[in-house]
Amino acid sequence: MTTSFAAGWQKNTTGWWWQNPDGSWPANCWQWLDGNGDGTAECYYFDGNGYLLVNTITPDGYLVNDGGAWVVNNVVQTKQLGPSGAPSSSSSVSYSTKTSSSSSSSTSRDGWYGSRYRQNGSYLKNTWKTIDGDRYYFDSNGYALTGFHTIGSKTYYFNSDGSLRRSSFSRDGYYL
């Protein structure tokens, strides 16, 4: 007799997990999954028992939303799948993220969490911060700004990683 397993999202009183076709499940890892079969995978983190983390910061410092998907600046990160259902080698994920260099296992450790920076247990908000020689400005939600922004009476440009552009250039992209 062969046992068959229902692959896909499963739920019990503890939470959600992903069950592979062979009955196994991911644990202590990130997994790109296309749970709704639309050809686009979202990235999810599963704890040591295989349960999906939701509305939290993962152990490696990234933010996941209420559905458990990895988000940067409130945008779910996605990857197009190839014909086999695996992420295609030609696809790429568009995001700007910093990683924390801290090795502490505390959930209140200082450092980068996606595009937010935690200091003394709180995200920096509405403030400037120099980190590793680069200047950043963090908005009211704690996210590093990107693109053009006016702060006070001055307009600044922040690179895609959130760092302040140090060279001068005009809005049409020409360096001055």
Image (cartoon, rainbow, N blue to C red):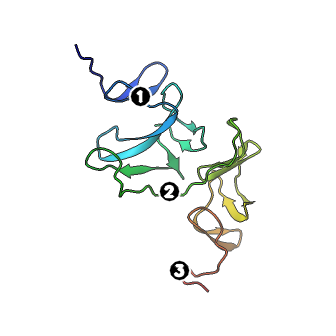
Whether 138 is drawn above or below 152: the answer is above
Q: Say which label, 3 or 2, has the lower sequence index.
A: 2
> Mark 3 or mark 2, which is nearer to you?
2
Q: Residue drawn at (55%, 84%), measured in percent from left and top?
A: 174
Give percent across and percent down for residue 164.
66, 68
Query: Does the residue at mark 3 contact the one at mark 2 (Cβ under 8 Å)?
Result: no
Residue that numbered label 1 is attached to? 25
Q: Residue drawn at (41%, 57%), measured in percent from left and top?
A: 92
Q: Residue 35 carries which label?
A: none
Give percent across and percent down for residue 11.
41, 23
Q: Which residue lies furthest to the top in this view?
A: 1
Residue that numbered label 3 is attached to? 173
Whether 3 is drawn above or below 129: the answer is above
Q: Which mark is residue 95?
A: 2
User: What kind of residue is marked 2?
Assistant: Tyr
How many labels, in total? 3
Q: Residue drawn at (46%, 58%), measured in percent from left and top?
A: 94
Q: Judge by depth and name the residue closer to the eye, 126 or 20.
A: 20
SS for callout 2 = loop
Q: In which quarter of the image is residue 42?
A: top left
Screen quadrant of the C terminus: bottom right
Q: Residues within 10 Å of mark 1 (few under 14, many from 20)?
A: some
SS for callout 1 = loop
- 90 vs 162, left or right, is left
